[in-house]
Amino acid sequence: MPITNAQKKYLRQAAHHLKPVVWAGQNGVTENLLNEIEQALERHELIKIKLRLGEREERDKGIEKICDETSAELIQRVGNMLTLYKRNKQKPVIKLP
C-alpha cells in the first residue's frame, strides 16, 4: 500500500530527532549493507542512513538500489542523509494516520 503525502509528512516529523543507524561508505551498496538495513528496518520501521557514496549520480543509484532491494519507502533525502520506512507486518512500531 503506497504511503500518502500526509503520512510522509508525519514520518518526516517522527524521524526529525533520529540519528543515523546505518552508514554507507566508500564500498558502496554491498550485500552486507543491505542486510544491515533490512535488520534495522525490521526493528525500527523508520530509520536514517548516512551516505558517503561520492557524487550525486552515484548516490542516486545507491538510493534506488537500497529502496528496490529492501522494498522500503523513501521518505526524505537531504544531502547525504536518507530516511526510509518499511512497515513491520508482525509488530508495527509506528501508527500511521
Image (cartoon, rainbow, N blue to C red):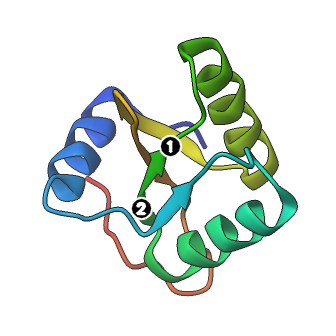
Residue at 76% x, 70% y: name it: 35
Q: Amino acid at mark 2?
A: Ile
Residue 47 at x, y percent in the picture: 42, 61
Quadrant housing the N terminus: top right
Does 79 sit left or right of 33 as displayed?
left
Q: Are marks 1 and 2 in contact (CB under 8 Å)?
A: no
Q: Amino acid at mark 1?
A: Leu
Secondary structure, mark 2, is strand
**Which residue is most to the front?**
26
Does 73 sit left or right of 65 as displayed?
left
Residue at 62% x, 21% y: name it: 60
Separation of residues labelled 1 and 2 (CA atoms): 13 Å
Q: Is residue 88 at all visible to an observer of this figure? A: no
Residue 32 at x, y percent in the picture: 80, 68
Residue 28 falls in image quadrant:
top right
Identify the residue under disc 1: 51
Identify the residue under disc 2: 47
Q: Which is nearer the eye, 49 or 28?
A: 28
Residue 43 at x, y percent in the picture: 51, 83
Residue 25 at x, y percent in the picture: 60, 51
Residue at 69% x, 33% y: name it: 62
Picture mark count: 2
